[in-house]
Amino acid sequence: PGQRPPPGRDNRRPPRNPPSPIAPLIAGSIASLVFSALLAWYFAKPIRNLRNAFQAVAQGRLDTRIGLGMGRRRDELSDLGRDFDHMTKQIGNLVGAQQHLLHDVSHELRSPLARIQAAIGLAQQQPEKLPATLERIERESQRISDLVGELLMLSRLEAGVDKRTFEAVNIADLLADIVEDVGFEAQRNGISLEYSGIGDIRGYCLPELLHRAVENVLRNAVQHCRRDGSVILAADFERNNARLRIRVEDMGPGVPDRDLAAIFQPFFRSGKPTKAQSTGLGLTIAQRAIEAHGGRIGAENREAGGLRVTIDIPFPSRQTS
């Protein structure tokens, strides 16, 4: 003890080599790769689901849904999945409606064609009845022509209306012309047509469509009104908010409450035989035409019996005289 190291000798320990940075770099790289792979899988899975869903829809499987496959995600991809489900649902509804309409159109065309064929066969067997047979053929041919015309109008409305084609017209004159035209049919059926009009009001609208809409509603009321009854058309223009309100009432049998909204569907039948002069598209075209003007149309049963149809149309740009 107490000995000192010989002078001139360095008794310090040799310095250690610094740790190699390779190991942390490798560990960090591996962690980054694992995290990137998990992140890529997290985002790639819903994208693959969307791609597969689009392929399924392209093949006609419109019942494809991917919302449940998104799990509990709360990001843009989950929003995209919900938008996809909403889109496919809407497309499915539209396709289903078109298929239903095509089925109804086929049925409506088959009936007059069958009657025409029967009339032709009758004319061949009994030539003495040729005039009556030709009259029947002409009547059924006119029915087919009317149906095709209504279908073309409905197709035009379904395709959309160009707002730039709106024109300034006198609404009072337009309603008066409709009442005059339908009045002849009402008089022939023993029905009185009462009209409560408005003063001269000019508004921007689609004259042909508005005329067709109100005329269809009024003719429908005349067709279903009892023979000794009356049909009321009352129009009122609210100058404060520039809205035209039209009310059409009849004294017919009315419609069951459960069918009030359905009467505006194409070829709707409420358990009652369809009128011979009806194409089954009048109220449907009226609804589409009113909606093209940004308005609303609805129906309700009157307490005294019969149906009341109400039309509400905004006219933001107008001139009064």
Image (cartoon, rainbow, N blue to C red):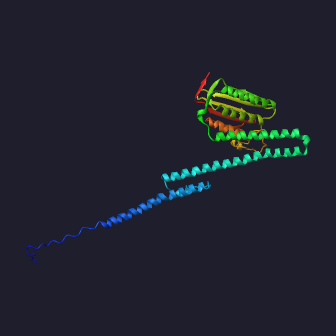
The quarter of the picture where residue 227 lies is: top right
Q: Is residue 240 above or below residue 61?
A: above
Judged left or right of residue 87, residue 129 is: right
Residue 48 appearing in the image? yes
User: Which residue is farthest top?
Assistant: 321
The residue sitting at 84% across, 40% down in the picture is 136
| Quarter of the image that includes the C terminus | top right
Q: Nearer the viewer, residue 67 or 138?
A: 138
Q: Quadrant of residue 221?
A: top right
Where residue 82 sits: x, y (%)?
54, 52
Residue shown at 82% from the left, 41% from the top = 137
Question: Residue 26: horizontal and vertical position, in percent?
Answer: 34, 66
The vertical placement of 209 against 87, above or below, is: above
- In the picture, measured across the screen, residue 241 lies left or right of residue 196, that is left
Q: Residue at x 70, y 47 (%)?
A: 102
Q: Quadrant of residue 16?
A: bottom left
Please provide percent x and percent y for residue 208.
67, 32
Is residue 302 shown to the viewer in this render?
Answer: no
